[in-house]
Image (cartoon, rainbow, N blue to C red):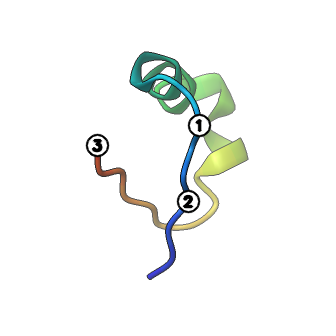
Amino acid sequence: MSSIVINAPPDKVFEAVSDLNRHANWAAADISIIAE
């Protein structure tokens, strides 16, 4: 499994991944999100 570090505040990341209009841009493959 690979990972990505996103240099953004959690609220901005959640805003992006919860925007269903943009879902196809980032959900082409299975993903998991783990808050640290």
- SS at mark 1? loop
- Check the picture and name the quadrant holding the N terminus: bottom left
Residue at 64% over, 60% down: 28
- SS at mark 2? loop
Alpha carbon separation for disc pair 3 and 1: 12 Å
Q: Which residue is mark 3?
A: 35
Q: Position of residue 32 (x, y in %)?
A: 37, 58
**Looking at the picture, which amino acid does disc 3 mark?**
Ala
Q: Position of residue 7 (x, y in %)?
A: 59, 37
Alpha carbon separation for disc pair 2 and 1: 10 Å
Q: Residues within 10 Å of mark 1 (few under 14, many from 20)?
A: few
Q: Residues within 10 Å of mark 2 (few under 14, many from 20)?
A: few
Q: Are marks 3 and 1 in contact (CB under 8 Å)?
A: no
Q: Looking at the image, is 4 positioned above or below residue 33?
A: below
- SS at mark 3? loop
Q: Which residue is mark 2?
A: 4
Residue lying farthest to the right in this orientation: 25
Residue at 54% over, 52% down: 5
Q: Which residue is mark 1?
A: 7
Q: Nearer the viewer, residue 14 or 5?
A: 5
Q: Looking at the image, is 23 positioned above or below residue 28?
A: above
Q: Earlier in the sequence, mark 2 or mark 3?
A: 2
